[in-house]
Image: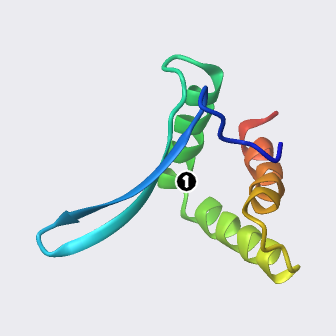
Amino acid sequence: TRDPFPEGRPMRTGASDFQGRRSFVHVHVVAAGSTEAADTLYFRDCLRADSELRAAYMAYKKKILASGVSDSVDYAIAKGEFIRQCLGH
């Protein structure tokens, strides 16, 4: 939707400084034990374990951007297709 992060499923952004280095983060808050949480962790683990999958995901996201998509919600919707294929949904 155009409001993908309602208070029932928020995203928060911030930064953390550690040993003189700043890291920027965005955090999605989902219910523990939910299907979304399990799917997200599974996809993360797949990316960590498979360099070819990581390269394919990066190429897919670059293709989205090259097509002219600049809106963050449209971008998230577009990359969802790749993620759903990986999850088998």
Instruction: Determine the residue positioned at 55% across, 56% down.
Output: 50
Give the mark count.
1
Name the residue that disc number 1 marks: 47
Residue 55 in picture, x, y percent from top left: 63, 70
Task: Name, please, the residue furthest toward the right.
Answer: 67
The amino acid type, in three-letter code, at marker 1 is Leu
Residue 11 in picture, x, y percent from top left: 54, 44
Quarter of the image that includes the C terminus: top right
Q: How is the image coloured?
A: rainbow
Secondary structure, mark 1, is: helix
Q: Nearer the viewer, residue 70 or 6?
A: 6
Quarter of the image that includes the N terminus: top right
Instruction: Determine the residue positioned at 53% across, 21% down.
Output: 31
Q: Against 44, is 63 above or below?
A: below
Residue 5 in picture, x, y percent from top left: 65, 40
Quadrant housing residue 23:
bottom left
Quadrant housing residue 63:
bottom right
**Residue 1 shown left or right of residue 5 in the figure:** right
Q: Nearer the viewer, residue 26 or 7?
A: 7
Task: Name, please, the residue furthest toward the front.
Answer: 7
Q: Against 30, is 81 above or below?
A: below
Q: Crowdedness of circle 1 by 10 Å Cα count: few (<14), some, many (20+)?
A: some
Instruction: Determine the residue positioned at 59% across, 31% down.
Output: 7
Task: Name, please, the residue furthest toward the left.
Answer: 19
Q: Nearer the viewer, residue 58 or 16?
A: 16
Residue 49 in picture, x, y percent from top left: 49, 51
**Residue 86 shown left or right of residue 50 in the figure:** right
